[in-house]
Amino acid sequence: MKKRLLVLILAAAMLLSFVPMSTMTAAEEPYTFSLYYNYDWWTIHPWAEDEISKYWQEKFNIVIDQRKPDADAAAKLNLMVSSGDLPDVRVCRPGAPAGQQPHV
């Protein structure tokens, strides 16, 4: 669990490095990026309900739109690719078929 949280924080930090600090003010709309977990068994915790995500939202003015497939991860991924509705970040295990549980 700690590794997953660390990976999420590092991914968010990498994405935020592309946003100039001068463009992030409290009066502007929050910067939203999508995070897609390629596993139907993954549990998504709501954004800004824990202390870490609240801090990130307040400090950096970001919102993470977390998504996952309801069932059949491979079909959902194929549909997203064919429709062009791709997320900013996709969480998966390299080389694993869609929906397969990673080795942790």
Image: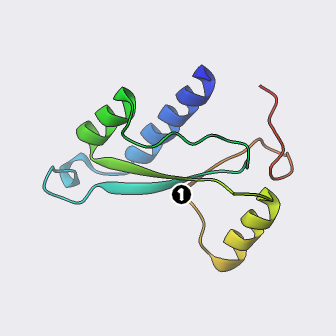
Outermost residue toward the bottom? 83
The residue tagged with tag 1: helix, strand or loop?
loop
Outermost residue toward the left? 27
Task: From the viewer's perspective, tell me whether residue 71 is left or right of residue 89.
Answer: right
Tell me: residue 84, above or below residue 75: below
Outermost residue toward the top? 2
Label count reads 1
Quarter of the image for residue 96 reads top right
Q: Nearer the viewer, residue 45 or 55?
A: 45
The C terminus - image quarter? top right
Q: Nearer the viewer, residue 23 or 26?
A: 26
Task: From the viewer's perspective, tell me whether residue 69 is left or right of residue 11.
Answer: right
Task: From the viewer's perspective, tell me whether residue 88 is left or right of residue 103.
Answer: left
Q: In percent of the image, x 53 and y 36: which residue is there?
A: 8
Q: In percent of the image, x 57 and y 60: which residue is there?
A: 87
Q: In percent of the image, x 42 and y 43: which residue is there?
A: 47
Name which residue type carries label 1.
Asp
Q: Which residue is identified by label 1?
A: 88
Tell me: residue 102, above or below residue 25: above
In percent of width and height, residue 98 lies at 81, 53
In percent of width and height, residue 92 lies at 72, 45
The N terminus - image quarter? top right
In percent of width and height, residue 61 lies at 27, 47
In percent of width and height, residue 35 lies at 54, 51
For label 1, count other residues whose C-alpha is less than 10 Å away and answer few (under 14), some (14-19) or many (20+). few
Q: In percent of the image, x 61 and y 29: which residue is there?
A: 4
